[in-house]
Image (cartoon, rainbow, N blue to C red):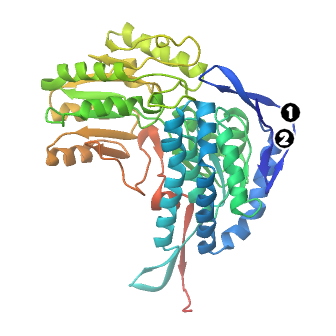
């Protein structure tokens, strides 16, 4: 049993003010794998006070020195990448090979992209040739509360910490209590990299406790949150009392629009993308819209692919998917699969219950529904598990209407070999991101959505800007 009962505040590991233990569960076994402490208001206040005290000095530190510290962080991050992968695999169920490559690998990827963006970013710039005595200054928002999820923990921690550190913000990180171990290793990395005391602080807690305290705290200037739309709404309400800046990266219900002229691997690619990370991704292509001439064949292919996806323990090496994170999620997914059956969608792969041979652990059968429509629960709600809903369409206009008929707007996908149509679809789809023909977004591309998928962008120059205020200065003296 791993014990992680201390918090990282003002450059030191300190004991919580009140004993409030929480068992972290290994979802592969349903057994406790670690015990942590959940913070109290006194712990939250101490972390915010440390960040507030460190802010003036950190803001005044030349940006070149802040960048150099993030570069040092990348070095120590890479030296501990195996520790991070093992923690993520243990606590949230990512298969160890996937945890090494995708989960832990995402952290160094984002930090390197921030370095590239920051070195090209003008933190002070002239307004324009028409105004020689006006300057635009980008400066830190201030104390930033960073609230991160369990499903892609290092991905989200580094997207927030990297940008905030370079921008000159001081921070309090509250990782998910479901996957806190990797974040505590990350705190060790921040310490080893040499960030000044108080610039980075970590307090474990749940959303109702530390999360709510941070979002309402008068000395917090900004909240950057990744998680459910429901929690994002609550954070926005809490933050409104102090008019703090709020950045939200929330849920999604992405449409993957497969036209009749899509490449031969498009359906297989879409199913495997949906199943990646056991479907626990906000940008998962969970609705596959297929043009009617190829619909029957696409359903057959999707079922075949889903039936080849193996499920097993996160601690075993190999190419398989692991369990979902906890019993609450498992039960929710089972209920939604049953809702799909009850509402008349045609089950072509998977279904309720655990996969054959797995009697313990939060394992879900890779599931595909055909003949769904966009009014069904499985097409409306974010399932957050390995469940795909397939919907037929006839025309491009109908595909756009179905794809956009959702409260979410994070990522949509388009599969067609007609370049003009692909570009037209990209303009018409209401989402923060559109990925076409299996082409992933490039380094530094902004991640984020619209509608109930949130606001703001993470990654690259847009991620930096989210942690910066814009100051207009007139009468700038020549130096």
Question: Which residue is at 72% across, 51% downward?
Answer: 188
Q: Position of residue 61 (x, y in %)?
A: 67, 73
Mark 1 highlights which residue? 19
Residue 187 in the figure: left or right of residue 282: right
Left or right: 426 with respect to 311?
Answer: left
Q: Residues within 10 Å of mark 1 (few under 14, many from 20)?
A: few
Secondary structure beneath label 1: loop
Q: Residue at x 42, y 53 (%)?
A: 446
Q: Secondary structure at mark 2?
A: loop
In depth, the one of 447 and 87 nearer the eye is 87
Q: Residue at x 41, y 44 (%)?
A: 450
Is residue 285 visible to us here?
no
Q: Which residue is mark 2?
A: 16
Position of the N terminus by quadrant: top right
* Cα separation between marks 2 and 1: 7 Å
Where residue 468 appears, as percent x and y from the top left, is 56, 63
């Amino acid at each position: 049993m791993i014990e992680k009962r201390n918090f990282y505040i003002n450059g030191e590991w300190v004991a919580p003010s009140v004993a409030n233990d929480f068992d972290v569960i290994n979802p592969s076994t349903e057994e406790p794998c670690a015990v942590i402490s959940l913070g109290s208001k006194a712990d939250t206040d101490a972390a915010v006070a440390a960040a507030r005290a460190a802010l003036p000095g950190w803001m005044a530190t030349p940006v070149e020195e802040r960048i150099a510290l993030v570069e040092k962080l990348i070095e120590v991050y890479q030296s501990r990448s195996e520790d991070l992968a093992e923690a993520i695999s243990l606590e949230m169920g990512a298969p160890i090979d996937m945890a090494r490559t995708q989960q832990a690998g995402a952290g160094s990827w984002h930090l390197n992209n921030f370095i590239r963006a920051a070195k090209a970013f003008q933190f002070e710039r002239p307004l324009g040739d028409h105004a020689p005595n006006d300057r635009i200054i980008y400066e830190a928002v201030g104390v930033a509360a960073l609230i991160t999820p369990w499903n892609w923990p290092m991905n989200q921690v580094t997207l927030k910490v990297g940008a905030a550190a370079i921008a000159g913000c001081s921070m309090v990180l509250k990782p998910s209590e479901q996957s806190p171990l990797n974040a505590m290793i990350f705190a060790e990395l921040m310490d080893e990299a040499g960030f000044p005391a108080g610039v980075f602080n970590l307090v474990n807690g749940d959303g109702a406790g530390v999360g709510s305290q941070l979002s309402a705290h008068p000395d917090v200037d900004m909240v950057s949150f990744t998680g459910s739309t429901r929690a994002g709404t609550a954070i926005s309400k809490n933050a409104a009392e102090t008019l703090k800046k709020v950045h939200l990266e929330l849920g999604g219900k992405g449409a993957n629009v497969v036209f009749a002229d899509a490449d031969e691997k498009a359906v297989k690619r879409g199913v495997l993308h949906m199943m990646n990370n056991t479907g626990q991704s906000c940008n998962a292509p969970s609705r596959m819209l297929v043009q009617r001439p190829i619909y029957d064949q696409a359903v057959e292919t999707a079922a075949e692919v889903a039936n080849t996806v193996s499920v097993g323990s996160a601690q075993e090496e190999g190419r398989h998917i692991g369990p979902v994170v906890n019993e609450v999620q498992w039960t929710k997914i089972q209920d939604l699969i049953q809702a799909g059956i009850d509402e008349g969608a045609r089950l072509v792969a998977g279904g309720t219950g655990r996969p054959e041979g797995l009697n313990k652990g939060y394992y879900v059968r890779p599931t595909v529904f055909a003949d769904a429509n966009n009014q069904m629960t499985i097409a409306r709600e974010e399932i957050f598990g390995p469940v795909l809903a397939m919907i037929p369409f006839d025309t491009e206009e109908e595909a756009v209407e179905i794809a956009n008929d959702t409260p979410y707007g994070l990522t949509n996908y388009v599969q067609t070999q007609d370049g003009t149509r692909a570009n037209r679809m990209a303009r018409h789809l209401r989402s923060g991101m559109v990925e076409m023909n299996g082409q992933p977004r490039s380094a530094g591309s902004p991640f984020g959505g619209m509608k109930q998928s949130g606001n703001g962008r993470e990654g690259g120059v847009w991620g930096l800007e989210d942690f910066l205020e814009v100051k207009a200065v007139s009468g700038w003296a020549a130096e």
